[in-house]
């Protein structure tokens, strides 16, 4: 019991140190630390949402760029075309991405396994082409979001960190609830889960909508920060390469994995200069190698070697009094 | 007007031969090892680049170059399966998806570094000449697309249906564990199937290079074409795959004609989603090749 208590204290100390470090950034960090941490926070949040789908709900998708583009464009169109304030357009991004996730999910769930992964990509591709042909959003040349230029960068920072913490909290809470059990049951054996009375379709759709809203909000924030959006970049498949890289390298099916993966991604990005062919070759090659050599990612290695996870989701069976040591 | 519509439909039918061939490769991999091989489009484009950027400028005649590309791609598909993709099998759907997606990213961006983002195409007399068919004119290259695509389908059906290798492949597809008891090594069969799939991709790549311009990122477009062809045609049905290819090509050409060239792909995507709504099992569903 003391062991479990010590482990709990170590976990709490690490979590508290991370949260305090992030929240107190203005006191110790300058502009470059802020920019790096914003990039880290929104990548970690995106990976966390993908992990909810691929790592827990068994929904492997390469189509989350759909919600990145939609979230970003909702903000841009809301501010530039409908005269909304940045906060209102930001909130609207959640409504639009969540609302659209319902029909998209209902349609793509007809495809199973790998075909679902490509089907969701196809829908994103359709929106990329559609926005590129749409005069209302300036075709493929994209839109500037002028009202977003006056937003204080520290406010962006706090919203990014807040989104990340909220998503981590939401994922932990969900996974420890009945819905979380249902999700993991679906991932491990969909038919058996259905046989045990899990509403497979409904639970999957719920996860899909939650991930869409989370992804859309992050995308809206990215668009506030940039503040520019273009269909080819916003709906690009490269987002899926980055997101799956982070979740796989950090450790799928763990809460800390995507956060670790995002940290590695940010370091890599600074070493390799952000984008371009070499960057994507490294992301692809490392994902392949990790999947073959250590499919659990870094979090999986730590768990297997040290028997320790930062955020335990597993329930410990209650110890019965007559068997207690 | 009617003649114009007929011409579009005829062109769609012919181009559908190429699209069917593109879908066929994806179908072979899925049929044998139940893996959606996300790098398939990039292998097609790799073959096209190998042909147009490496072989033809070196003075190899186009037909001889095509004859080199096909076995080379068979080898690449075989080796990738044996040493990379094969190691990710048996642990659920996620590992092979991540692995083939990673290969796709690597191939696409290596092509970008090696051959730049410039548009490429195979210069040949096929692309510029036309054939008159009862008052209609179609580009010769589309007739070749159709004939070669159909020939590949016929060869593949014959190999699968009538040879010992085909029986072993089908047995592995139906039940790998029982096939192993009968002395068939499933890993060897998977590697051969992946090699055949990549070889059909090489033929498709040669046709692609002769038919239109392409870029390193065309691989993603080709994967989506393959996926759409398979979804429309029905999973696991080779003849359905060809019908799917024809429908998809017709949708693209009608969309381009009615709405403008930039609407070609989006019309095809819309037709696929419509099929998914109305007939999710595809046109000609069947469970195994």
Image (cartoon, coloured by chain):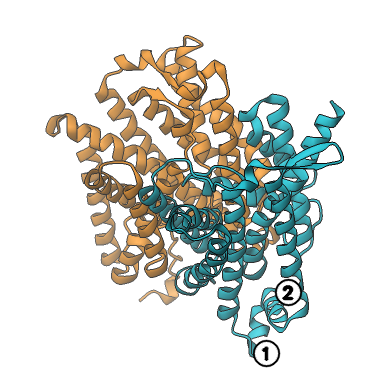
The vertical placement of A323 against A119, above or below, is below
In what quadrant of the picture does the N terminus of chain A appear? bottom left
Res B170 seen here: yes
- Residue at 27% x, 54% y: name it: A11
**Hue used for the chain lettered A:** orange
The vertical placement of B171 against B128, above or below, is below
- N-term-proximal mark, 1 vs 2: 2
Task: Give the distance between the C-alpha atoms of the residues marked 1 and 2, in whole angstroms.
Answer: 18 Å
**Residue B129 percent location from the top left of the image:** 68, 42
Tell me the element at label 1. Answer: loop
With A211 as the anchor, is B257 left or right in this view?
right
**Residue B173 percent location from the top left of the image:** 68, 73
Q: Which residue is mark 1?
A: B182
Chain letter for mark 2: B
Q: Which residue is mark 2?
A: B160
Q: Where, by quadrant of the figure, is residue B166 drawn?
A: bottom right
Residue at the top extreme, as displayed: A83
- Residue at 20% x, 40% y: name it: A21
**Residue A238 percent location from the top left of the image:** 43, 43
The crowd level at tag 2 (other Cα within 10 Å; few <14, some 14-19, many 20+) is: some
Tell me the element at label 2. Answer: helix
Do the residues under discs 1 and 2 have CB atoms within 8 angstroms?
no
**Hue used for the chain lettered B:** cyan
Chain letter for mark 1: B
Residue at the left extreme, as displayed: A28
């Amino acid at each position: 019991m003391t062991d479990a208590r010590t482990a709990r204290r170590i976990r709490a100390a690490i979590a508290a140190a991370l949260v305090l470090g992030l929240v107190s950034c203005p006191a110790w960090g300058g502009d470059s630390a802020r920019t790096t941490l914003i990039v880290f926070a929104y990548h970690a949040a995106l990976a966390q949402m993908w992990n909810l789908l691929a790592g827990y709900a068994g929904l492997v998708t390469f189509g989350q760029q759909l919600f990145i583009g939609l979230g970003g464009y909702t903000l841009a169109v809301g501010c530039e075309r409908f005269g909304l304030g940045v906060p209102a357009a930001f909130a609207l991004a959640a409504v639009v991405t969540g609302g659209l996730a319902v029909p998209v999910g209902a349609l793509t769930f007809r495809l199973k396994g790998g075909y679902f992964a490509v089907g969701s990509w196809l829908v994103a591709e359709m929106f990329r082409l559609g926005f590129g042909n749409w005069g209302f959003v300036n075709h493929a040349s994209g839109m500037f979001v002028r009202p977003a230029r006056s937003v204080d960068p520290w406010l962006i920072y706090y919203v990014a960190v807040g989104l990340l913490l909220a998503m981590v909290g939401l994922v932990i809470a969900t996974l420890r609830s009945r819905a979380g059990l249902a999700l993991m049951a679906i991932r491990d054996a969909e038919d058996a889960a259905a046989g045990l009375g899990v509403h497979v379709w409904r639970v999957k759709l719920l996860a899909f909508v939650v991930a869409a809203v989370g992804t859309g909000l992050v995308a809206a924030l990215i668009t506030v920060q940039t503040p520019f959006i273009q269909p080819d970049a916003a709906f690009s498949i490269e987002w899926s390469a980055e997101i799956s890289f982070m979740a796989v390298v950090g450790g799928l099916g763990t809460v800390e994995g995507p956060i670790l993966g995002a940290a590695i991604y940010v370091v890599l990005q600074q070493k390799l200069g952000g984008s371009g062919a070499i960057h994507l070759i490294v992301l692809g090659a490392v994902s392949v190698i990790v999947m073959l050599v250590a499919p659990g990612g870094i979090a999986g290695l730590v768990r297997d070697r040290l028997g320790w996870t930062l955020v335990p989701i597993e329930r410990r069976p209650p110890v019965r009094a007559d068997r207690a040591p | 007007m009617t003649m114009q519509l007929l011409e579009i439909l005829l062109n769609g039918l012919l181009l559908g031969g190429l699209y069917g061939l593109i879908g066929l490769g994806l179908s072979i991999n899925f049929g044998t090892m139940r893996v959606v091989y996300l790098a398939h489009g990039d292998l097609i484009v790799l073959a096209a680049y190998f042909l147009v950027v490496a072989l033809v400028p070196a003075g190899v005649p186009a037909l001889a170059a095509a004859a080199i590309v096909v076995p080379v791609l068979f080898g690449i598909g075989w080796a990738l399966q044996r040493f990379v993709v094969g190691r990710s099998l048996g642990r659920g759907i996620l590992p092979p998806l991540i692995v083939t997606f990673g290969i796709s990213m690597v191939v696409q961006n290596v092509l970008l570094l090696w051959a730049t983002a410039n548009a490429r195409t195979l210069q040949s007399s096929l692309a510029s000449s036309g054939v008159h068919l009862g008052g209609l004119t179609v580009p010769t290259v589309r007739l070749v697309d159709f004939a070669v695509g159909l020939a590949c389908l016929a060869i593949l059906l014959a190999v699968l249906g009538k040879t010992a290798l085909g029986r072993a492949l089908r047995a592995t597809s139906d039940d790998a564990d029982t096939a192993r008891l009968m002395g068939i090594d499933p890993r060897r069969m998977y590697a051969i199937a992946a090699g055949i799939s990549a070889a059909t991709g090489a033929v498709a790549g040669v046709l692609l290079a002769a038919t239109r311009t392409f870029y390193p990122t065309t691989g993603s477009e080709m994967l989506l074409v393959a996926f759409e062809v398979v979804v429309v045609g029905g999973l696991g049905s080779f003849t359905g795959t060809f019908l799917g290819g024809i429908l998809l090509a017709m949708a693209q050409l009608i969309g381009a004609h009615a709405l403008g060239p930039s609407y070609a792909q989006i019309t095809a995507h819309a037709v696929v989603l419509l099929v998914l709504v109305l007939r999710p099992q595809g046109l000609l569903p069947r469970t195994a090749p």
